Amino acid sequence: MIEDTSGEKDMGDTKIVYDEKFGITTFKREICAQLGEAFWNELVENIELPDIDSECKCQCHNMYQFMKRLEEMTDEETLKKILYKVRHGLHPSQCEWAHKEFMEAGNLDDFLKEHVKNGPAGCGCAVVQDDKLLYEGYYGYADLEKKKIITPDTVYRQFSTTKVIICTAAMMLFERGHFLMDDPLYEYFPEWKETMVADTGEDGGIYIRAAKRPIQIRDCFSMAMGIGYGGEDYTHQMMEKVRRNLAETVGDYTLRQDIYAMSQVPVRFDPGTHFLYGFGHELVAGLIEVVSGKKVSDFLQSELFEPLEMNSGLSLFW
């Protein structure tokens, strides 16, 4: 749970449905919106879509082939509309478009002005080289309804950029000898001792079994613990159910309550066997609380933000 403790600083109304914002699911939604479901079916016919059960190099190859076919089957303007929404997995030639548009604009000011016409409501950009600020520009709105413009003091939702901060803080504790990467997660969260795996059988049924080994701390850091953020699989359905129940019974639940509740969810695969972007770093944040004895927000403030003199920002952590 990310809590806005900004007081008077308005974050605007940003609504993101996470199970619709990741990977192929995002592409499908935007492509169907632009070109229809029949086009989508033709697009994915006889090609393998990226999947967690394939090796990383296969996932990259499959994504490359998917993007290549998408470009072959659409005109440039339509594809740009889709990519403005998705912003993920660009084919090399699509990266060339951005470079071409920038060069045609001639300067960052014109480029960013055009950018906010087609993409986000607003943006800020700074270019720094050798500790020197070479460029700074702000365009568009932080809040469209209130016509609140983007400024140097605009507060952005950090979303997954918080993961870098969380992992940095956790590694500080690792260097101090507070935990080891091979430690079982249950040593810090006992409720995670009996991790279960949800297998899908050949008949399409869901079969629950014990994991071959416990989740280790390294699995949480490397996103290999088995619970993701989106999808239509059984694990994600159970994750949503558990969180709905938690919200209904507790209300504004804490990080530790979330971690306890999520221990009831069967993971998608045996720990350490696949990469799946998701819940691992929430567990790392919880680990910070357990081994430091502080709320993660307090630890970050005293150990990172204050020493770095980051005083103009905003605490958005649990």
Image (spheres, grey):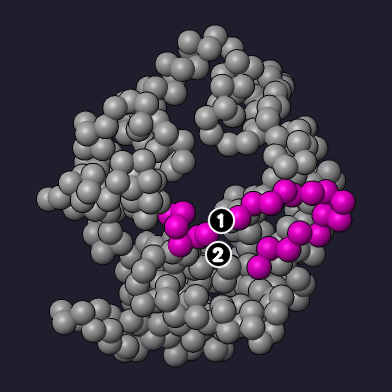
User: Would you say 95 lies left or right of 287 here?
Assistant: left
Q: Please name the residue that numbered disc 1 is placed on.
A: 16
Q: Which residues are magenta?
A: 1-22
**In terms of depth relative to the viewer, which is nearer, 119 or 137?**
119
Amino acid type assigned to the residue bearing label 2 in the image = His
Q: Quadrant of the C terminus?
A: bottom right
Element at badge 1?
loop
Query: Is residue 19 on the magenta stretch?
Result: yes
Q: Quadrant of the N terminus?
A: bottom right
Query: Is residue 98 on the magenta stretch?
Result: no
**In terms of depth relative to the viewer, which is nearer, 101 or 193?**
101
Q: Give me the residue at 86% from left, 56% from top.
A: 7
Q: Residues within 10 Å of mark 2 (few under 14, many from 20)?
A: many
Q: Give me the residue at 37% from left, 26% from top.
A: 77
| Residue 162 higher or lower than 264, as above or below | above
Magenta part mainly helix, strand or loop? loop
Q: Please name the residue that numbered disc 2 is placed on.
A: 281
Q: Give me the residue at 76% from left, 59% from top.
A: 4
Residue 176 in the image: state x and y as whole percent.
67, 65
Q: Give me the residue at 42% from left, 16% from top.
A: 100
Quarter-of-image position of residue 147:
top right
Residue 94 in the image: state x and y as whole percent.
36, 28
